[in-house]
Amino acid sequence: MTLIYRFCRGLLLCCLGLGLVGCQVAIPHYIDPIGGYGFDYPAGWEAVEVRDASPGVIVVWRDRLDPTANLSLIANPTPDDVLAITTLGTPTDVGYRFFKEQTARLKAAQSGLQLKFLGAEALQKGITPYYQLEYAVTWPDGRQRHNLASAVVQNQQLFTFNLVLPERRWQQQPQQWRAIVTSFEVF
């Protein structure tokens, strides 16, 4: 091994082991080559076994220290004529439609949850369009949560990659959380 290689390796191990200020550790990335998707996830989060989940739930990742913070990936079939997310409407149309459906479901369940649609935007990755949808949720006891999702249609499936966090955590690092949701990609 060359001296430069040893130095770089030692510096990396030092940054990882001691957590020196100024050293940045890469965000872990998960790839499922069979499912055809990948995404970044925060260090310290772990995949949890998906049992008795809602239909379409593929994977769930949780923060080991705060299990109310999670990432999930859901896939649902689309009609044959839906080849891209743009077929479903504009980002705002899709986000608002989901908002109305969820609000009606919550009202029917008398859960007391309040959902607020914060906005939507289109992103392009290569030739594939993605939509990012953002919501705020308030629980009956006043707890506030933030939900940011990336949605895409691929292979007649609507994939929705969701990040759900307590609002206080969202406010601490919104750009980091946006980068994680934006990292979701189908291939």
Image (tube, rainbow, N blue to C red):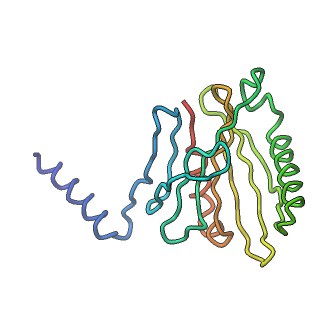
Residue pictured at 50% horizontal, 49% vertical? 40
Left or right, 125 with respect to 93, comes to left
Q: Position of residue 146 (x, y in %)?
A: 70, 63
Q: Which residue lies most toward the front here?
A: 52
- Of residues 181 and 107, which is closer to you in this image? 107
Please provide percent x and percent y for residue 120.
77, 47
| Residue 137 image offset from top left, x and y in percent | 77, 64
Identify the image quadrant of the C terminus: top right
Question: What is the quadrant of the N terminus in the image?
Answer: top left
Image quadrant assignment for residue 23: bottom left
Residue drawn at x 68%, y 32% is 153
Q: Residue at x 56, y 67 (%)?
A: 67
Residue 177 vs 78, above or below: the answer is below
- The relative height of residue 44 versus residue 104 in the rendered view (above or below) is below
Residue with the most extreme bottom position:
141
Left or right position of 39 against 152: left
- Residue 65 higher or lower than 150, as above or below: below
The residue depicted at 33 percent of the width and 70 percent of the height is 20
